[in-house]
Amino acid sequence: MNETRPRVLLADDEAAITANLAPFLERSGFATSVVSDGQAALDQAHAISPDLIILDVLMPLLDGREVLRRLRRSGNWTPIILLTQVGEASERALALEEGADDYLNKPFEPHELVARMHAVLRRARPGQPPLASAWRLVCDTGGQGSRLVLDRRARRATLGDQTLTLTPKAFALLEYLMTHPDELLTRDRLLDAVWGWDYPAGTRTVDTRMAELRRSLKDDPVLPRFIETIPGEGYRFIAAVRNSS
Amino acid sequence: MKPSTLRPHLAATIPIYLPTVIPFMVGLAADILLHAFLPATPILIVRADFSMVLFLAGCLASLIYLVSILTRQGSENHARQILLETQQAQDETRRRFYRRLDHEIKNPLTAIRAALANFPEAASSPEQLRVFRDVQHQVDRLSRLVSDLRKLAELEERPLEKLPVDLANLLEEVAETARTHPVYSGRNIQLVLPKVPWPLSPIIGDPDLLGLAFYNLVDNALKFTGPESPIEIRAMEDGRSLLIEVADTGPGIPPDDLPRIFEELYRGTNARGFEGSGLGLALVQRVVARHGGTVSVRSRPGRGSVFTVRLPF
């Protein structure tokens, strides 16, 4: 066994899921341990110090949220992906307090889970809270007056010394982009996370709002500093983001 | 009851007591005249007869009429209140059902998807591969349906964005999106917007959800008509609300289907051969209702259909 493989702890009480998902994660390059309740998840999180934890929300003994809370309270910042109920991901994705690194609705596509796992591992800074729970995000692109600051508590964004005028939706979109930098975000995913619905006809909505956001950020789609278009796929926030809470 | 609703009923009592007032007034005038010429006569000589009785009877009849109206209105209000509460209870039951259904289906579906992800595609025969792709496609469809149903139910509780919406602009965007859709390229989509004497007034609402609702109507119109058939989107205002119509020359909707087409998963008899989730019109209806508006449809079999959305200012 290759020792450099990331270790992942998978906690779900549904045996049919773990029995099929664990081998898939193994094949995708993760050394996978499985537990089937919240207490075992908490114990194993301390015992084996995994690189990443995947937590189902509804589990016996302790639910996934409680496990997450207890880990964070004890200063454990292991990246965590929470498996939520349909519709919950959008409510939680922009929540400051909870402290998960990402959310995924069941029934998810396993390849999507692996993509999220890679993204979360790439973003994670050892021993530091995730960007998702930072209340102040800063992005320096180097140019004059191009420092982008997102104050999530005050719901205010500034570029250089200018406060940006953003609709609540545009702010939420920027917030999601900045908490998921360097990750390919499909229109469906943005709709789901920011709008809470992802009907196929809604993808034009993302493009419209993205164009507005780019105008506010004075970001040229051809030579972007912040938001890059991935043709036929979606968008990616390309500037480096740091937590400055 | 508000005074404005009571006023017509008060007016309705006039014919009841007025005939009794006239003899009373005549009696009063006669009494005054008699008293003037013959001061010795008491003032109540003439009125102490039937005109007084008649007047009192008229007052009594008016009162009984008013009381009966008021109690009837009270019970009507009560019945309406009960109906509303029943409706709300039904909605809540439906939402609870979706949550349970969602929860019971999501785990097996997640397990099936995980199992399919382990399928050895490289080492399979073409026939196995075909079956695998079929199963995967159907599982994706089922997953999509479950989450769409749930999200539709959630649309009723989710807070709406409240921004000024320029509907002319929004409809232009919707028409443009449809025109540039690869499946609908080259389709004739007409947009008729008023300009004289003033353009459409803005309304307050959620621009993204409204855009989604109108796009659904346009998408339906395009889907159910041939490539040569034109589609018309038209908007107007009548001082109280905005009216937006999406008209097509499709097969029309059979009269039996009309009352049901806005229900979720209902597929009209004319719609069976077409691809769709059966949720589009239900979504339109929810979005419009959340904006305090209504959506209705007129249709003639063989001629076409007109969907009308009415949004209050």
Image (tube, grey):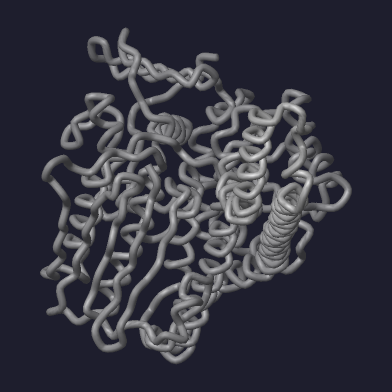
Compared across the picture, whether A36 is left or right of A140 comes to right
- The answer to whether residue B191 is above or below residue B253 is above
Locate residue B96: give its quadrant.
bottom right
Coordinates of residue B282 in the picture (x, y in percent): 48, 66
Locate residue A75: give its quadrant.
top right
Residue furthest to the right? A61
Q: Residue at x 50, y 50 (%)?
A: B290
Coordinates of residue B12 in the picture (x, y in percent): 58, 54
Compared across the picture, whether A89 is left or right of A161 comes to right
Q: Residue at x 59, y 33 (%)?
A: A95
Q: Quadrant of the C terminus of chain B?
A: top left
Residue furthest to the bottom? B127
Does residue B195 appear in this view?
Answer: yes
Quick one: B273 or A84, which is closer to the camera?
B273
Residue furthest to the top? A161
Q: Residue at x 37, y 71 (%)?
A: B297
Quick one: A60 or B89, which is closer to the camera?
B89
Coordinates of residue B312 in the picture (x, y in percent): 40, 46
Compared across the picture, whether A181 is left or right of A34 comes to left
Coordinates of residue B43 in the picture (x, y in percent): 75, 33
Q: Quadrant of the N terminus of chain B?
A: top right
- The answer to whether residue A96 is above or below residue B57 is above
Does residue B74 appear in this view?
Answer: no
